Amino acid sequence: MRPPRTELNLTEWIVLALASEAPTHGWTVVRALRRDSPLGEVWSSSGPLVYRAVSRLQDADLLQSVGVAEGHGPNRVILEATPAGLEQVRE
């Protein structure tokens, strides 16, 4: 069996960096990484990969949910970088 991966991939780094700038939710990050967005012109990623990155970052205690944004449509979990996540981005 392959050992668990410890290094972050680029999508995970981007999700963590965006969450370290300000609380956000997955859908905002998905939109930011679309091919037709300014950031997406440099690096684009699909919705499933963004949500997989969110899950992995939460499992690694680098990202945490801090509430729910209510509005039109489904509620969205608000995410922010943990102190350990902020440290990773700073390094």
Image (spheres, helix red, strand yellow):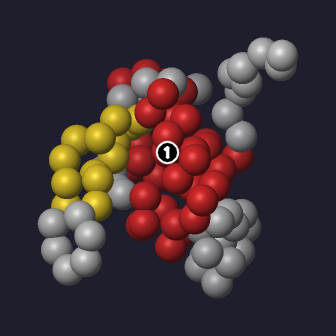
Quadrant the C terminus occupies: top right
Q: Is residue 86 visible?
A: no
Q: Residue furthest left?
A: 70
Residue occupying image coordinates x 29% and y 53%: 77
Quadrant of the rendered image containing residue 40: bottom right
The residue where tag 1 is placed is: 54
Is 25 in front, or is 13?
25
Q: Does dot 1 land on a helix, a strand or a loop?
A: helix
Q: Position of residue 18 (x, y in %)?
A: 47, 52
Q: Position of residue 15 (x, y in %)?
A: 53, 49
Q: Position of residue 89 (x, y in %)?
A: 53, 34
Q: Residue furthest right?
A: 1
Q: Residue furthest bottom?
A: 36
Identify residue type, mark 1. Answer: Val
Q: Residue furthest front?
A: 1
Residue 72 sits above or below residue 89 on the image: below
Horizontally, is 30 left or right of 69 in the view? right
Q: Is residue 13 visible?
A: yes
Is 45 in front, or is 52?
52
Residue 31 sits above or below residue 77 on the image: below
Residue occupying image coordinates x 41% and y 47%: 19
Is 42 in front, or is 72?
72
Horizontally, is 1 left or right of 80 in the view? right
Q: Position of residue 27 (x, y in %)?
A: 42, 66
Residue 46 sits above or below residue 81 on the image: below
- Please rate how many residues cluster around mark 1, counting C-alpha atoms within 10 Å: few if below 14, some from 14 to 19, many from 20: many
Quadrant of the rendered image containing residue 88: top right
Residue 78 sits above or below residue 3 on the image: below
Is 33 in front, or is 50?
50
Residue occupying image coordinates x 51% and y 35%: 57
Residue occupying image coordinates x 25% and y 77%: 73
Q: How many labels were placed on the picture? A: 1
